[in-house]
Amino acid sequence: MQYSFKEVFGTLVVQKELFDVVAKPLVEDLIHGKNGLLFTYGVTGSGKTHTMTGSPGDGGLLPRCLDMIFNSIGPFQAKRFVFKLDDKNGVDVQCEVDALLERQKRDAMPVLKTPSGTQIDPEFADMINVQEHCKAEEVDEDNVYAVFVSYIEIYNNYIYDLLEEAPFDPIKPKWNNCNTPGRNGDFIPPQSKILREDQNHNMYVAGCTEVEVKSTEEAFEVFWRGQKKRRIANTQLNRESSRSHGVFIIKLAQAPLDADGDNVLQEKEQITLSQLSLVDLAGSERTSRTKAEGNRLREAGNINQSLMTLRTCIEVLRENQMYGINKMVPYRDSKLTHLFKNYFDGEGKVRMIVCVNPKAEDYEESLQVMRFAEMTQEVEVARPVDRPLCGLTPGRRFRNQAFREELSRKLEMRGGPINAEREEQALSEMFLQNFPPLPLCELLDVNDDEALPKLIEVLGKRHKARQMLSEEIAKTSHALMTALQEFDSSVVSKENYMQEKLSEKEKMLAGQKMELERREKKIKTLEYKIEILEKTATIYEEDKRNLQQELESQSQKLQRQASDKRRLEARLQGMVAETTMKWEKECERRVAAKQLEMQNKLWVKDEKLKQLKAIVTEPKNEKPERPSRERDREKPIQRSVSPPPVPNAPPVRLRHRRSRSAGERWVDHKPPSNLPTETVMQPHVPHAITVAAASEKALAKCDKYMLTHQELASDGEIETKLIKGDVFKTRGGGQAVQFTEIETLKQESPTGRKRRSSPSNSDPPGVAADSEWTDVETRCSVAVEMRAGSALGPGYQHHAQPK
C-alpha cells in the first residue's frame, strides 16, 4: 500500500525537527491572534504521548510550544490579573489598581498557588530545559500579553477538569456499598463538565479551571500536575496506555497600550483572545488483541466510538466539499468532535500527526489509520479574516520608555531629585530664589551708616514679600479648602448616588442571575430533548432504511412471483391444450365404440326378428313327438342356476352370497367407461355407495367392495364381471381390500348353435327338418321355463366360482 502525506518523518527524527515543521507555524499564528489545533492520532502504543510530552533531555511538542510563547512575549507580559477571564469564554481588562487589589486578595487566600521562581521539580526539569531559544517573528511590541492554560480529559465521553484542587484518586476511588462517595471526606468523585457555546458560537468547557502563568516552568508544572491525574492503565499492548483523550489548552490574551504607552487600553473590543489546543488522543485498539475486560473493555469501546465519530465528521465534510451538498455533520455524537466543531468549520488551522508503529501485528490498524489520515488532507475549510487594527500609532511603548530614560538622565545631570528628600530640597531652593538677595553685611566701622539701613530695607522687602506670600497661601488654602469641601460634598452625593445605583444594579444582577439560572436549566432541558430527538431521528432513519430494504425485497419477491405466474399460465395453457386434444381423441374413440356397439345390437335384433319370423311362418300340420324333451330331463341342464334337487342327496351350499349382504354396507365401484346393457338381469346391491372411483372415505364407511368390469368375449358379446372383496383397516390408518370371488354375467344364444337363415344347405332333408324342429322346440321350451319363474334373463348363465 502507498499513501501520500505533506511530510513524512523517519524513526530517527528529533523533536526539534518535528516541532519546526508542524507546531512552530501554529505558535506564530497564536501570537498573531489566530486559533490552532494540533492532535496526535494512531493505534495504541504508537508513541502519541511521547510525541506530545517528550522524554527527559528531549522535550516534546508541548514544552517547546510553551518555551517559544514565553520567549516571544516575555518582555511584554502584563502583570497578574490585568487580564481576567470570565465564565463565558471571554476576557476583561482591569486597571493597575484593581489588578493590585486582586493580587493582594489572591495572596491572602489559603489556596494552593503555583510556585513561581522556586526550584523546578526534577521530575520534569529535563523536559523543559530547551537549549534552542526559539522566538516568533513580528511580535507586536505595543501590546501586552497574558497566558492562561487549562487541562481537561474526555473519559468515556465525559469531560473532566484535571486542574481541580479536589483530592482525586483515579485508580482506587473510595466508594461505599451504596455506590456513593464515602463520608470520611478523603475522596470526592470529580464532576463532569458540560460544553457551552459563547456569543461568537465557539464551544468551550463551562466551569473549567484556567490558570494564568508567567513562565515555561510554571506552565509545564501546571500541565504535569494535571498529567498525574490522567487515566492510564496497563493493557496487553501498552504498559501505560492512555484511557482518555487529553486536551491541553493555551489561551493568549493581548490588548494594545494607550496613546501614552503607559497603561493598557481599557476597551474590551480591542482585546484579542487566541487559543492553541494540543490534543493527545487515546489510541484505537482491538479488544481481541488487548484482552480487555470490565472497565478496560468499556473504555476501549468509548475510545473507538469517539474516534469513529471524528472519522465520520471528516468524511461528511469531504463529501459536502466534493459533491457540493450541505449534509449535516454529526458533531454532537461525541464530546471530542463537539468541542472542536469550530475548527472544522474554519475557525483556525488544524494539524494532525499520524503515529505509526512498524510492528507487523499492527499492520491492519496502521492501514486504517493512514487511510483516514490521507483522506483528511482533501478537506478544506474557510479561514477567518484578520482582526482590524486599533488605529493607534505604533512604537508607543519604546517612545515612552525612551522619554522616561531621558528625563531621569537630565534630572541626574542637574542634580535633580533622585528621591523624595532631594525633591523637597529642590522645591525649597526654588522658593527662596524668589526673595530679594541679602546685601553684604560686613561692618568695617562703627560709624558705618549704610550697611544697616540697607539690611533693614532688604529685610523689610523680604517681610512684605513673605506677608504677600502668606496671604496668597492663605487665600489659596482657603480656596483649596472650599474646593475640597465642595468636592467632599459632591463625592458624598456621588457615593450615595452610586450606592443607590449599585443596589439597583445588584437587584438587577440578582434578577439576571435568577433568569440566567432559569435559562441554564431550560438549556439543559432543551439539550436533553435535542439529544433524545437526535436518538429518535437515528432510530427512525434506521427503521426507514430497514423498511426500504424490506420494500425492495418484497418488490423483488413480487416480480419473481409474477414471472412464476406467467410461466405457470403458459404451462397450464399447454396442459389444457394437450388435455383437450387427448379428450377429443378419447371422445372420438368412445363414439366409435358406441357406434360399433349399436351396430352389434342392431344386428342382434335383426337376427332375433329373423328367428321370430321363421317361427311364425313355419307350417303346423302335425304335432311332432318330443323325444328331445325327455332326453333333456334325463341329463342336467347346464343353464339352470339351481338344478332340481336329487332325492336322497345332501343339500349343496352355493357360493352365491347375495342373501348375506342385507345388513352389510357395500361400495359399488362402477367406472364411467362401462357401457349399459339392455338385459333383464342387472347387478344390484341394496344400501350400496355407488362411486366412479375408489376413495378412502367411501371404503372407511363400508365392509364390502364390488368392482363392475366389462370386456369383449371371443364371440363378440359383452362379458360383465363382478369382482367382490372384503374391506380391512391397515396399521397405518388406511383401508385395504382383499378380493374373495368373481361373478360373471354373459349373454349368448340359447342353443349355442347358429340358426339356418336359408334352406339351401348341404344337410339332408330329414336332418334339416329335425334340426329346425329341435331349435324351435328348444327355444320354446326355454322360453316356457323363463316364464315359469326363472330369475335369469334369456340366454344368461350364472356361474359362481371361488377365487
Image (cartoon, helix red, strand yellow):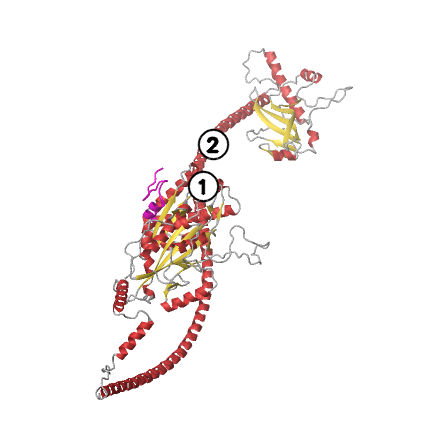
Residue closest to the eye, 249 or 322: 249
Residue occupied by mark 2: 579
Residue 4 is inside the magenta segment: yes
| Secondary structure type for disc 1 | helix
Whole-angstrom CA distance, mark 1 to mark 2, is 32 Å
Q: Residue 561 vs residue 485: left or right?
A: right
Task: Residue 38: tell me if it is visible.
Answer: no
Instruction: Return the mark for residue 577.
Output: none
Residue closest to the eye, 699 or 546: 546
Residue closest to the eye, 486 or 563: 486
Tell me if mark 1 has few (under 14), some (14-19) or many (20+) residues whose alpha carbon lies within 10 angstroms of its own.
few
Say what amino acid the circle numbered 1 marks.
Lys
- The part of the chain drawn in magenta is 1-22
Main secondary structure along the magenta-highlighted residues: loop
Residue 287 is inside the magenta segment: no
Residue 139: image location, x then y, percent: 29, 57
Residue occupied by mark 1: 557
Classify residue 421 by image quadrant. bottom left
Locate the C terminus by quadrant: top right
- Furthest-right residue in this view: 648
Residue 117: image location, x then y, percent: 40, 57
Residue 272: image location, x then y, percent: 33, 61
Q: In percent of the image, x 42 and y 74: which residue is there?
A: 502
Tell me if mark 2 has few (under 14), some (14-19) or many (20+) residues whose alpha carbon lies within 10 angstroms of its own.
few
Is mark 1 in CB contact (under 8 Å) with mark 2?
no
Q: In percent of the image, x 33 and y 72: which residue is there?
A: 420
Say what amino acid the circle numbered 2 marks.
Thr
